Image (cartoon, rainbow, N blue to C red):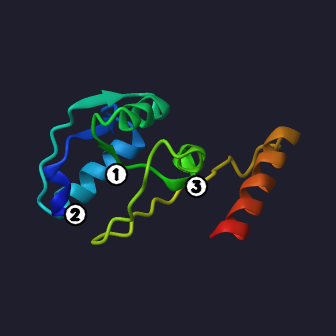
Amino acid sequence: MKDIVEYPVLLREEGSANRTYLKHVFAMYDIAIDPVWESANPQALINAVEKELGIFILPEKLMKRDLLEGGIESRKLQDEELTCKAYLIWHRQKNMSEELKNLKEVCKNITEREW
């Protein structure tokens, strides 16, 4: 992880879940990151990586297409296994719409299949 400071770093915007999580991970390793560029758009950051403007840490799913197209390469971080849990929550005493029931089922299927 400490090697990351040798490269120009691209980050999501301040306040995004991705950036907040990465700031926490960097702090655990006592790494100070000063991004060369920030964006709210992950695809814009991937495009910046393709133009060799820096490196960007993001979930594999968000870069899968770009990896397959060959515009970028990826490396697994050696010191840290980055995982982030997300939860779908709803009011227990309210009627659940069909749309929310469908979303709940999709989330359940994804978590059973991929994790």
Give how far across and how far down residue 64 sits, in percent. 57, 50
Tell me how far mark 2 sits from mark 1, CA to CA.
Answer: 14 Å
Classify mark 3: residues with Cα within 10 Å, few (<14), some (14-19) or many (20+). Answer: few
Q: Nearer the viewer, residue 25 or 11?
A: 11
Look at label 2 and name its amino acid: Met
Rendered residue at 46%/59% (across/down): 84
Give how far across and how far down residue 72 sits, in percent. 45, 46
Say which quarter of the image contains residue 82. bottom left
Tell me how far mark 3 sits from mark 2, CA to CA.
Answer: 27 Å
Q: Which mark is residue 87?
A: 3
Q: Secondary structure at mark 3?
A: loop
**Which residue is identified by label 1?**
21
Q: Closer to the observer: label 3 or label 2?
A: 2
- Could you tell me which quadrant the N terminus lies in? bottom left
Look at label 1 and name its amino acid: Tyr
Give how far across and how far down residue 28 sits, in percent. 19, 63
Q: Which mark is residue 1?
A: 2
Q: Secondary structure at mark 2?
A: loop
Tell me how far mark 3 sits from mark 1, CA to CA.
Answer: 15 Å
| Residue 6 as seen in the image, left or right of residue 45 | left
Q: Closer to the observer: label 2 or label 1?
A: 2
Q: Closer to the observer: label 3 or label 1?
A: 1
